[in-house]
Image (cartoon, grey):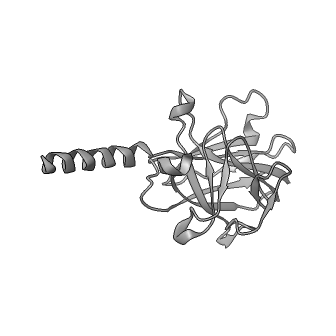
């Protein structure tokens, strides 16, 4: 009986671990300043202009991971592009879309780098509180139910919890012809982190 119970608990743990798997996604939007891009896909991430955008599609990119992100290990995902014009672009970090809200898995973002250097406050250590008490990393904004978790990152560092509808976003001024390489350290959130 004890062996059967242990096997059932092990199977439940395996299902719970894999139920947390998610697809990491980043959207880049230069529509406001009409910044168009040369897209640089890579081995980790697919990349394409945003298909739902009707005008200025060349000013958008969606990157999505080629494999699922697990909740067991922190992984680095890289996106890169070269703007054809200068201006400000919006970067929106999320999980992938799914048919139902419940299926839109959550991802933890632990760090953001730009061109092999920590992006300003890309480790989320500096924060501010909004009028309603929400803690937000300085230089970023959170939409919906995205939230700052002060110790959920690697080795107890800060992380931000996101999914498709609840995002971590920031703006970047870009120069035409200069290649921008962003790296994000992420892993899928566990069910207890999504409370």
- Vertical comparison of 89 with 48: above or below: below
Looking at the rendering, in which quadrant would you find the C terminus?
A: top right
| Horizontal relation, residue 186 to residue 120: left or right | left
Q: Quadrant of residue 145?
A: top right
Q: Position of residue 43 (x, y in %)?
A: 48, 54
| Horizontal relation, residue 65 to residue 112: left or right | left
From the viewer's side, name the closer residue of 57 and 38. Answer: 57
- Vertical comparison of 72 with 13: above or below: below
Q: Position of residue 89 (x, y in %)?
A: 80, 50
Q: How many marks?
A: 0
The residue at 67%/51% (across/down) is: 147
Residue 85 visible in this rendered orientation of the protein:
no
The residue at 77%/56% (across/down) is: 140
Q: Position of residue 45 (x, y in %)?
A: 53, 50
| Horizontal relation, residue 123 to residue 10: left or right | right
From the viewer's side, name the closer residue of 52 and 176. Answer: 52
Q: Residue furthest front?
A: 1
The residue at 86%/41% (across/down) is: 32
Residue 36 visible in this rendered orientation of the protein:
yes
From the viewer's side, name the closer residue of 80 and 2. Answer: 2
Q: Position of residue 44 (x, y in %)?
A: 49, 54
The residue at 70%/65% (across/down) is: 124
- Vertical comparison of 111 with 187: above or below: below
């Amino acid at each position: 009986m004890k062996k059967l119970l242990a096997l059932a608990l092990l199977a439940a743990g395996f299902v719970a671990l894999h139920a947390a798997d998610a697809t990491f996604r980043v959207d880049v939007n230069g529509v406001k300043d009409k910044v168009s891009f040369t897209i640089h896909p890579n081995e980790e991430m697919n990349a394409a202009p945003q298909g739902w955008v009707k005008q200025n599609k060349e000013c958008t990119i969606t990157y999505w991971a080629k494999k699922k992100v697990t909740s067991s290990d922190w992984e680095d995902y890289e996106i890169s592009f070269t703007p054809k014009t200068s201006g400000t672009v919006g970067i929106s970090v999320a999980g992938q879309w799914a048919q139902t809200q419940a299926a839109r898995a959550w991802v933890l973002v632990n760090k953001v780098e730009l061109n092999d250097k920590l992006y300003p406050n890309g480790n989320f250590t500096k924060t501010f509180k909004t009028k309603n008490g929400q803690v937000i990393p300085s230089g970023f904004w959170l939409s919906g139910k995205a939230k700052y978790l002060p110790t959920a990152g690697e080795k107890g560092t800060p992380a931000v919890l996101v999914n498709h509808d609840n995002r971590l976003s920031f703006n970047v001024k870009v120069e035409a012809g200069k290649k921008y390489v962003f790296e994000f350290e992420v892993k899928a959130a566990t069910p207890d982190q999504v409370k």
